[in-house]
Image (cartoon, rainbow, N blue to C red):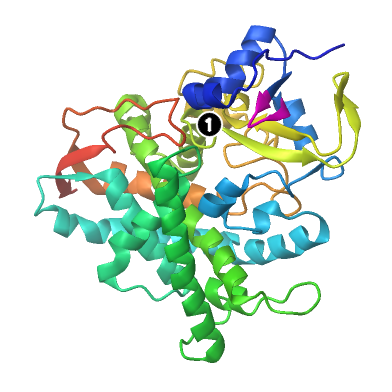
Amino acid sequence: MSIPHDKSLDNSITLMKEGYLFIQNRMKKYNSDIFTARLLGEQVICISGEEAARIFYDNDRFQRKGAAPKRIQKSLFGEDAIQTMDGQRHIHRKLLFMSLMTPPQQKLLGQLVREQWQDSVTKWKEKNEVILFEESKEILCRVACNWAGVPLDESDVKERAEDFMNMVDAFGAVGPRHWKGRRSRTKTEEWIEEIIKEVRSGKISAREGSAIYEIAFHKQLDGSLLDSHMAAVELINVLRPIVAIATFITFSALALHEHPEAREKLQSADDAYFEMFVNEVRRFYPFGPFLGARVKKDFIWQEAEFQEGMLVLLDMFGTNHDPRLWENPLQFFPERFNDWDGNLFDFIPQGGGDPAKGHRCPGEGITIEVMKETVAFLVNDIEFHVPEQDLNYSLVRMPTLPESGFIISNITLK
């Protein structure tokens, strides 16, 4: 069987025009979980669905080296970082990240965020309204740095938070947005690298077990320390994703606004329902559009030839909305997770597979705890008004967000 081929000289511009729906549009057109297309001058295989995710996260068949374009490494991940590694080197580095993000640390970060939200209410009384996305960025930046042991002056919080989010915003961008993200990365790497050097020299005291200490003194497989620049890149890969939870928080607020029945249930809900709610936010609303990997060795799947070195894109957004996996996928329904079996390949908002052995995000547990505590704050700690505003979000822009950033006003403690 020959797999469908999207007949176009190059789909790069089409991808930018269709965004999150690029792969899904063609899956529907060809009635297939797989098709090929030309992107940035090379033949690419696009795949979607649970079985596709299982194949994609098979480390014997795929590798990450060479998958992330340099433009994404120079803005989002950092060059030669953990996301581009494979084999024992990747597992060794991943264990470092996993050791920092244990369940007790996840709970701690959630609690720190809840406390920051509560402390913010006083200053909000002086404002007519606040933009939740902007407030989230700053709170998460402050908490992430404090938790990780990174010194951060209060006067610098806004700028540093902006830089972290600029890196994320550059992911699907060309032109000014992309260059803004690259400038922010360069600036942030210089800042963090200097701190790494000062921790190593003893000029800055760091607590053993903190992210900055463990990364500064992490030993590679050959027993050597990471060079100071790579240590900075990896510490940013701890901090940046925490700040990026601001996007999920903004969509959580939108979900509360659009689904008052869920908000009402949350007012008297146990932890299990809070988890179902935030998982449904992560499934339903757009975050990452797709992920890339390169074929490690030739193999055949669905009668298609995957040749060594080929770039393959896994459709995250489409898999999370696959009607074969999710009943009425375009309906927001937290209770669907009541019966979810914890499958690591049908629900992939932050990647698929086992986070300890593969490339699923090690910070997923942090995301869930931070979201739960924020939702609890919005539902049970404060009262607020949602004024008229543009809450639409584009499925073309990658990454996306409600246009207004979600404005709230008349905020008071309950």
Q: For the view shown, which residue lies furthest in the bottom direction?
A: 202
Instruction: Bin the neighbour count of mark 1 within 10 Å (Cα to Cα): few under 14, some 14-19, many 20 and up.
Output: many
Q: Is residue 2 above or below residue 237?
A: above
404 vs 245, nearest the viewer: 404
**348 lies above or below 113:** above
Q: Which secondary structure dominates the residues rendered in magenta?
A: strand
Disc 1 marks a residue whose amino acid type is Arg
Q: Is residue 219 visible?
A: yes
Q: What residue lies at 15% left-to-right and 53% top-to-bottom?
A: 124
Asked if residue 29 lies left or right of residue 394, the reply is right
Residue 140: x %, y % from top left: 38, 57
352 to the left or right of 330:
right
Residue visible at 76% across and 52% down in the picture: 357
The stretch drawn in magenta includes residue 44 = yes
Vertical relation: 175 (above or below) 97: above
Pointer 1: what residue?
A: 283
Q: What residue is drawn where x is 70% and y is 43%?
A: 67
Image quarter of the N terminus = top right
Q: Residue at x 15, y 58 (%)?
A: 123
Instruction: Locate residue 290, reporting x and y percent.
Output: 60, 33
Residue 374 x %, y %:
36, 48
